[in-house]
Image (cartoon, rainbow, N blue to C red):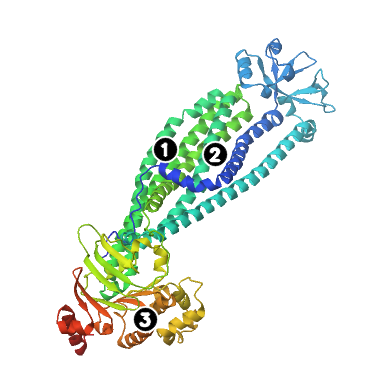
Amino acid sequence: MFGSHGPGEHLETTGKFFDRKVLRRTLHFVNPYKGLVALAFVFLMITAAIQIVMPIINRRAIDFYILPSYVELTRPDLAKEYDLEKYIVQLEDGKTLIKRPALSREISAELERMNAFGDIRFYITKKTIPGKEPLFVKTLDGRYAIEQTKINILTKPHILDLRKEDLREVYKLALLLVTILVISFIFSFLQGYTLQYVTQKVMYDMRIAISRHLLNLPLSYFDRNPTGRLVTRATNDVAAIAEMLSSVIVYLIKDFVVIIGVVVIMFRMNLKLTLLVLSISPALLFVTILFRVKLRDAFRRVRAKLAQLNAFLQESISGIRVVQIFNLEKIVKGKFQTQNKELFDANIQQLYVFATFRPIIDFLRAVTVGLIIWIGGGEVIRNMLTFGSLIAFLSYIDMLFQPIIEFSEKYNIMQSAMAAGDRIFELLDEPTEPKGRGLRKEISGKVEFRNVWFSYNTDTWVLKDISFVVNPGETLAIVGPTGAGKTSLISTIFGFYPYQKGQILIDDIPLEEYDLEHLRSQMGLVLQDVFIFSGELKKNIRLYREDISDKEIEEAARNVYVQHFAQKLQNGYETLLGERGASLSVGERQLLSFARALAFNPRILVLDEATANVDSYTEKLIQQAIRKVLKGRTSIVIAHRLSTIKDADKIIVVYDGKIVEEGTHDSLIKRKGMYYHLYILQFARSETGGL
């Protein structure tokens, strides 16, 4: 009874990070909003550019204004050859100073190889400190130079006074950083809002498409697919697609742009350190591929166990009455604990993969940072690299590793989205129900079967050569044992399932010629198993049809005695009914279904076992109502209680998909065939209390 499958589903995934087909069809829903997506992408590129440029601003602040930026040029003869005049300051003592951070990486490296730089760093100021003039050397342009080691012996106020210009430039750069951060915040907000707006619109359109498609699928599809699975298509699966759009696709492009931009800048700053950073790439690639394989397997196992647990839980709750009646609580609890433990173990395995991946990436990042500090620090000490460049390198390492760290989360999202998209588009590819050839006319109610054969599959015929005629206003009763084909017969009248041979005619016109929706609007069906929607009682009669007035609802309710129990409810016809009408008795739900059918005023009314689960008193009420409301209306009645169809104009007896008897109640009784024996059997059971 409680298996591992059922209403749930096996949420398997193909393990693909990108499924081109799914992605292409998803982008079809994005296409109407491509302008907004492009705008979001522009905003994203602006924030990416700001992210890349911020370490450059920090580097400039450190190298040009915070730390001394001038060194002695020991080979002044090279100034003209390398066009260095604009970076040079001449001292009165004959020394030549050069602003090294302003040089390009190539020229700086070339001069370093020629030993053209001295080891002492200098500050350039516009004034001296009274009493400390011997510490300064005047420049030819009227400024003053002081060695870094000598400025450290000055008092703090003197240092601040000397470096007033540097402080002013640092404040300007700090203000520039704040301004950039504010701009980044604005564009991040605009990008996030725009992208989320597009995502919500895509979700809206996708759910509309799924809903429209579901409503137009044939009943045979719903026979094969549980309701819970179909609901998941329009809820969880669409949400998974939306998460991919808002959290992965565009950000992957941003990450790619940031990585390319960072690597280019790092190459320009220092080739040696950049190659050192990139030397870690093979290890990162290996770890990432291994993680992807391990996570894919863990993800599949978690989804499978989750689907299994959901299916078991749904079955257990739906069948709670059976569980309690047969005292199965302990058994069900044990099975649930077993499946819950399997899901727990699968989650722990997935967590282990995540918990292993992140520390490994952090370790590789720490190793990279350590190598940069070791090698880069030596470069700074040897004047081969500025301190600001070293700090910028460390910032760029974080930018390179951050997308890799986030890859685990994005990979999980993409796995879910690809699997969800595959299921959504599989649903949307299902062929819809044929809607006929478009004939829209008001029918009088004549129904004719001409040698109709019908089968749910090609192996077994359910209806075999069925022929009969019901004229407008007549009542046809169909009787027969369970499985004879009675319900299948009325399903073909409504076009729920296509028949394979013969013809069904409504008003002498083949069923296929009609617009099926228009035809069904003139037909009513009352089933044995009545579905009650959550909401008001009158809503369950009107069924979202605003053209049916409250007066018509109350009139239909009176005709089938719904007002008998409606008046006893707290708010009458506006009383909120529970899920599936749990607050109503079986008989009350059956009466309500009659009111629903009558409110729609159908020309053809079909009753499928409509009184099978109704007590004798309620049955009498329904029979009285039927006599009034079926006058002038074609009706087809399927009933197990033969006493309810004595007044039918015609009765057909169906057995094994064939019509074996046909006639009125009296004529069939006189014939003493199958109908007679069914009637006598029920009469005998009624006499002994069996009915």
Query: Measured along the vertical axis of the image, is residue 589 above or below residue 145?
Result: below
- Compare residues 200 and 13 and report the one nearer the observer: 200
Location of mark 2 (residue): 254
Task: Quarter of the image for the N terminus: give it.
Answer: bottom left
Provide residue 347's location: percent of width, then percent of height.
Answer: 37, 52
Q: Earlier in the sequence, mark 3 or mark 1?
A: 1
Type of residue at label 3?
A: Leu
Identify the residue at the far front of this view.
508
Type of residue at label 2?
A: Lys
Provide residue 289's location: percent of width, then percent of height.
Answer: 39, 37
Residue at 54 percent across and 39 percent down: it is 254
Quarter occupied by residue 344: bottom left
Type of residue at label 1?
A: Thr
Query: Measured along the vertical axis of the image, is residue 401 above or below residue 608?
Result: above
Identify the residue at the far left of this view.
672
Nearer the viewer's eye, disc 1 or disc 2?
A: 2
How many numbered badges does the structure rendering display? 3
Q: Residue 630 carries which label?
A: 3
Identify the residue at the far bottom of this view.
687
Residue at 69 percent across and 32 percent down: it is 61
Location of mark 1 (residue): 288
Residue 19 visible? The answer is: no
- In screen coordinates, is 533 left or right of 652? right
Query: Measured along the vertical axis of the image, is residue 678 above or below residue 133?
Result: below
Task: Name the secondary structure under disc 2.
Answer: helix
- Compare residues 491 and 48 and report the one nearer the observer: 491
